[in-house]
Image (tube, rainbow, N blue to C red):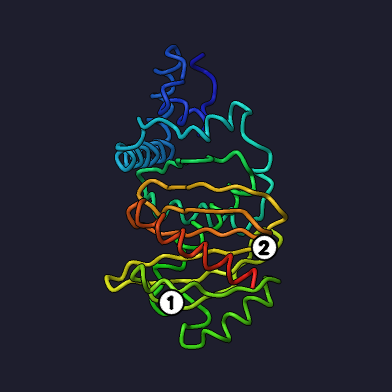
Amino acid sequence: MTARDFTERDIHLALDGELPAEERAAFESWLDSNPEMKARGSRYDADGAALRAAFAGVLEEPLPARFTDMVAGKERVSRVRRSPWWQAAAAAALLAVGGAGGFAVGTRDFGFEDPAGDRLAEEAVAAHAIYASEKRHAVEVPASDKEHMQTWLSARLGLRLVAPDLTADGFQLVGGRLLPAGESKAAMLLYEDEEGNRISLFVTGDSGSNAKGTYAAQNGPTAVYWLDKGYGCAVVGSLPRERLAAVARNAYGQLVAGIAS
């Protein structure tokens, strides 16, 4: 088959080792007679080598179970029928915290049996990853205007929101902002300790699901979340698990008391 014409597609077949062996000699002759295609093949080969070198550390890592489940058809439909905003934000945030080394998601307590808890935790982690590292624009309303912030966010969420006092846990309120959450809205309250560690409270109205659990991204923040009493709450941070859980219990208790009052 030495008389056939080769194309750019054959260059890719050759680089991938998929060009039939009996065509290899004719292909090499075609390259020699087409300097432009030969140069293009060299560029493709160099690009492939650079990519392999860049991702050498992760090429052999096992895929996260959630991806293999998706391919096997085990993934919940609710995972893919969600707001474009938080899907994009979650992807960006997970790439930011996971880097080229990939990422993995793990759960404890109740896992992800409730799709609403899954969604709440992912939205909260995405928001935290995007805004907690901001120096000048982390919040829309600063803590110095706390009363206005609480009134404004309460009106937008449709529930009475009182910012928890976390000074006993070593955290001071930085401020808050309004965020989209699916087809609804959410409030994010940001706190900081003396060492500069930041945690966030992500609060949104909920249709009535009841769930609680934890969500963690490898090398990224952890969320402790609840769905209860008509709203959802997630406390997110990169603190040790025990400390974050203790802060979350304190914040949750105050949020419940504030909303019920």
Q: Residue at x 43, y 19 (%)?
A: 26
Q: Which residue is mark 1?
A: 173
Helix, strand or loop at label 2? It is strand
Where 151 falls versus 42 (above or below)?
below
Q: Which mark is residue 205?
A: 2
x, y percent for residue 98: 38, 49
Q: Residue at x 46, y 31 (%)?
A: 12
> Label 2 to label 1, Cα distance in Å?
22 Å
Q: Residue at x 40, y 30 (%)?
A: 62
Where 7 falls versus 220 (above or below)?
above
Q: Nearer the viewer, residue 63 or 27?
A: 63
Q: Nearer the viewer, residue 256 or 78?
A: 256
- Indicate left or right for 130 with 261 as reference: left
- The part of the image, by quadrant, that contains residue 14 is top left
x, y percent for residue 105: 46, 42
Along the polypeptide, which appears first: circle 2 or circle 1? 1
The C terminus - image quarter: bottom right
- Indicate left or right for 194 with 125 as reference: left
Q: Residue at x 63, y 69 (%)?
A: 259
Where 158 falls versus 42 (above or below)?
below
- The part of the image, by quadrant, that contains residue 192 is bottom left
Q: Amino acid at mark 2?
A: Gly
Q: Amino acid at mark 1?
A: Leu
